[in-house]
Amino acid sequence: MLRKVAYLLPVLVFAALAAYFALGLRPDRDPHLLPSALIDKPSPDFTLPELNGDGKLSLAGLHGQVVVVNFFASWCVPCRVEHPLLMRLAEQEHIALYGIAYKDNVQDTRRILTQLGDPYRSIGVDRDGRTGFDYGVYGVPETYVIDKNGRIRKRFVGPLAADAVNNELLPLLQELNKS
Amino acid sequence: MIVELGHFALILAFCVAVCQAIVPLLGAWRRHYGWMSVGRSAALVQFPLVAFAMAALMYAYIVSDFSVINVIQNSHTDKPLLYKITGVWGNHEGSMLLWVFMLALCGGAVALFSGNLPPALQARVLSVQGMIGVGFLAFILLTSNPFLRAVMPPENGNGLNPILQDPGLAFHPPFLYLGYVGFSVSFAFAVAALIDGRVDAAWARWVRPWALASWCALTVGIAMGSWWAYYTLGWGGWWFWDPVENASFMPWLAGTALIHSAIVVEKRDALKSWTILLAIITFSLSLVGTFLVRSGVLTSVHAFAVDPSRGMFILLLLVASIGGSLTLYAVRAPSLQSGGLFAPVSREGALVLNNLLLATGAATVLLGTLYPLFIDVIGGDKLTVGPPFFNKTFVPLMVPVLAAVAAGPLLAWKRGDLLGALQRLWLAFAAAILVAVAGLYLTSGGPVLAILGLGLAAWTALGALVEWAERIKLFRVKPGDSWKRAVHLPRAAHGMTLAHLGLAISVAGIAATAFEREQLSVVRIGDSIQLAEFTVTLDKVERQPGPNFVADDATVTVRRNGVIEAVMHPQRRFFELQQQTTTETAIRTSLLADLYIALGEPDQNGGWTIRAYWKPLISWIWFGALVMAFGGMVSLSDRRWRVGVAARARMNAKLQAAAGD
Amino acid sequence: MKRFAAALLLALSFAGGASAVEPTERLSDPALESRARAISQGLRCLVCQNESIDESGADLAHDVRVLLRERIAAGDSDDKATAFIVSRYGDFVLLNPPVKPATYVLWFGPPALLVIAMGGLILGRRRRAAAQEVPLSADERQALARLMQESEQ
C-alpha cells in the first residue's frame, strides 16, 4: 500500500506545482511590483526646499492631515501618463496632493508643470534622491498615502490608474479622513 | 510569398504531427505493422517541413522583409548579416520555432537511427514525440506565430538588442535547445516503456545514447551561455543563479543523474522505475524552464516579452505532458519488476549515491528558484533567493558527489571493497593534500573553502586517472601491453574518464575564482595601474566606426617586469538606434590565468574608467565543460551502441536469470 | 546576456548608464571599502532583478552603493549598515533570504529531503532484502562467476 502511494508522489508534487503556476499567472499579479517596507510605520522625516518660493516642504508641516505624496520627475515618461489623473484628483476631489521632484533639474520640473499644469499644493525638490531613498522609492512615479499621525498607509508603484484611484485610493482617503 | 509558404509548411507540420501522434500508437495497440510504420514516415516528413519554415523566417530576416511583424520588431537593415541570421532566435517567436525545429530534428533522428528497435517500441516513441510536436506547434501557430504580416510595413525595423548582437547568440541557443529538446527522446522512451509495461537492459541500451547526446549538447549550451556572460558583462561574472540559468541547470543535473542510473539498468537490471522517473523528470524540468522563461511568473534578467495567455497555454501543455506521464507512471511503475540486489558498498551503491545527491541538488535549485513565487502567491512578503542561498545549500551537496566520483568506478558491481578502492586511491589522496597545502602556502592561508575546492578537484582528477591506469594496467605490465589494453578498452570507459576529468577541471576553475584580483581606477592616457604582477598602461583611446555602432577603442599595454606581455583593445560601443552602450571586454586567455580588461566611462578630465582583472584558472570552467561533453561524445562513439546490441542483451538476460534465483 | 531587458519592460522610469561599482564611489580606506563591497554583493538591485548592487549599472544601485558607504564610513557595523537599507526596501533586497518561519521550508527543505530520501532508500532495501534473500547454491555461484567473467571481457 505504502509502495503504491510512493509511486503517486511525483504526480501529486507536480499537481501542487501546477496549481501554484496557475495562481502565479493571474493577470493581476505583477512580479515586478514590490510592497513597501514602511506600511503602517512612521513615514521618514524630510525637509526639502520648495520648488516655488523660498519655503520648505517638510513632514512636520503636513502633520494632522491625510496627504498623498507623489514622487515624480520631468524625465519620467510614465509620470505623464498619470498626470491628467493627478490634475483631476486635485481639482475635483480636492485631495491634499504634494509632490516631490525626484532627482530632477529645477528648470525641467518647472517647464513640465507649466506645460501640463500643476496639481500639487506644494512641491519639494529632492535633487539627490535622498528622500526618495528614505521612502524606498525604486522608480518613479510612486505615490504614498500618509495619515494624520504621519504613518504611511499605502504605496502605489507606477502610474496611478483610474481603477486603482476609484477602488483603492479614494475609499482609503475617505476612511482616513473620518477617523 | 516565401513567408506564406513557411507559415503553410508549419501548418502542414502540425497536421503531420497529429498523424504521427495517433496512427502509430493505434498501430502498436492493434499490432498493425502498416500503421506502426506511419510513425517513421511522419517523423521523416515533419523535419523538412519545420526546417523549411525555419529557413523561410531566416530568409525574411536576411532580405529585411519589414512586412513581417517579427522582423520589424527584431531586425534592422544596418545589422550585420550574422546577426540578421542569429536574430531569428533572439526573440520569443523565433526561439520557439528553433525549439520545434530541434524537436523535429530529434524525431527524424529517431526515425533514421533506430531501425533495430522493436517496431512497437519505435512506434510508441515516435508517437509520444508527435504528441509533444502537436502541443508546441499549436502553441506557435495560435499564440506566437512569427509569420504574421504587418498592415503597414515601416521603412525600417526596431533592431536587435545590442547585447544580443554577439557571436554567442549564434551558438548558445541552438546547443541549449538541442539539449533541452533532446531529452524529449528519453522522455518518449520512458513513456513508451510504461505503456509497454517492460523495461530491460535492452531498453536502457537504446535510451542511453539519446540521453547522452542531449546531455552533451546541454553541457556545451550552458557553458557557452556562461562564457558569453563572462565576456560581455564587463566585470567577469559568469553564473548568477538567475531563474533562467537555473532553468537550464536543473535538467542538466537530472540528465546527469539519468545517464548514470541508466547504466545500472543496463548492466544490472536494477533501478528501473527510478530511471523511468528520471527520464520523465529531466524533460519535465526542460518544459518547466520553458514555462518560467516565457510566462513572466518570475522576474529574471533574461526576459522574453511577457504575455499571460502564452503562459496559460504552456501551463496546459505542462499539465498534459508532465501530468499525463507521471499519472501513467503512478499506474504502471509499481508493476515493473525490480531486478538484481546489491550491497550498499558497490558500483550500484555509488551510482545510487550519485543519483540521490544530484536529484536532491536539482530539487534544491527548483525550490530556490520557485520559492519567491510560492511566498508571493500565498500572500507572504516578497523575498529574494540569490546566490548566497545556492552557495550554502547546493554546493555542500556537490562535495560528496565529487568525493564519490573518484571512488565509485573502482568499486565492483554487486559488492565492492571500499577500503581496497581507497587504498588504490592513495595517489589521488596525496595529490589532493599536496594541492591543498601548496594552495595554503602560496596564498598564506587564503580562502580555505576555495583551497578545499582545489584539493577536491585534484582528488577527482587523479581518481579518474588512477581508475583508467588500472584498467590498462599502466606500469604493471609492459608499456606496449598497456597500450594494447587502452586500444581495446571500450570507448565508453575512455569517455567516462574524460568526463570525470572535465568535471574536475571545471571545479578547479570555479574554486580558483576566489583568488581573482581586481583593479578599478580612473586612468588618464599614458598612465598605468598595477594588477597582480602586471603593469597595465592606457596608451590611447580612439573613436572607430562600426557597422551599426560607434566604438571607443582603447589601446592597453600590459607589461610584466617591463616586458610587454600583451596589447589589448577593450571597447565601448554605442548603438545609435537603441541609444544603448555595450562593453566589449578584452581578454587574454592563457592556461593559468585570464587578463580581463573592460573600458568604462570617460570623466571630464580626460580619464577613463578601467576595470582590470586577473582571473586565475577561470577558463578552466568552460574548458572543463567542453572536456565533459567531449567525454560524452567519445562514449557515444562506442561501437557497442551499434553492433551486437541484441547479443549483449541476451547475455545480460542470461546473467540475470542466473543471478535472480 | 539580456541583463537589462527586464528593466525595459517595467512601466517605471529608471535612470541608468554606468556599469557596476565605479572608482569614484570607493572609500579611501581599503578595509572599509572591502567591507562595503562584501555587503553590497549581498544586496539586490531592485530595478534590475537578480543582480546585486555591486554588479549593477542602474542609477539606483549607484545611489545605494554610495549611501551604504556613507554608513560604513560613519562607523556603522555591517549588520547596522545592512539594516539601514533593509528598513527602507524590506527583506526583498537581501540576496541571502533571512531564516524566519516563512523561509523554514526553503532553508531546511533540501537537507530534510536528503534525509527522507536516504531513509526511504534504507527502508526499501531492508524490505526487499527480506523478501528476496535466498542464498545461491554452489552450482549457481559457479555459473554466475563464469558468466560475470565472460561479460567483463
Image (cartoon, rainbow, N blue to C red):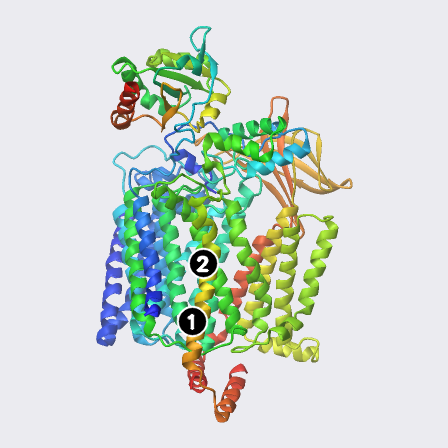
The alpha-carbon separation of the residues under discs 1 and 2 comes to 16 Å
- Of residue C3 and residue B491, the one placed in the foreground of this image is C3
Locate the C terminus of chain B by quadrant: bottom left
Q: What residue is shown at x 30% (from left), y 64% (from top)? A: B128
* Callout 2 secondary element: helix
Q: Which mark is residue C113?
A: 2
Q: Identify the residue under disc 1.
A: C124
Q: Residues within 10 Å of mark 2 (few under 14, many from 20)?
A: some
Q: Amino acid at mark 1?
A: Gly
Spot occupied by residue B8 in the image (x, y as percentages of width and height): 25, 52
* Callout 1 secondary element: helix
Q: What residue is shown at x 58% (from left), y 53% (from top)? A: B621
Please tell me in which quadrant of the rendered image residue B125 appears.
bottom left
Q: Residues within 10 Å of mark 1 (few under 14, many from 20)?
A: few
Q: What residue is shown at x 45% (from left), y 74% (from top)? A: C126
Please check whether the numbered discs 1 and 2 fall on a single chain.
Answer: yes
- Of residue B620 and residue B73, the one placed in the foreground of this image is B620
Q: What residue is shown at x 23% (from left), y 65% (from top)? A: B22
- Of residue B77 and residue B257, the one placed in the foreground of this image is B257
User: Among all residues in the image, which is located at the extreme top?
Assistant: A53
Vertical position of residue C130 compared to residue A102: above or below = below
- Of residue B367 and residue B577, the one placed in the foreground of this image is B367
Mark toward the start of the polypeptide (1 vs 2): 2
Spot occupied by residue B7 in the image (x, y as percentages of width and height): 27, 50
Spot occupied by residue B562 in the image (x, y as percentages of width and height): 78, 40
Spot occupied by residue B244 in the image (x, y as percentages of width and height): 43, 47
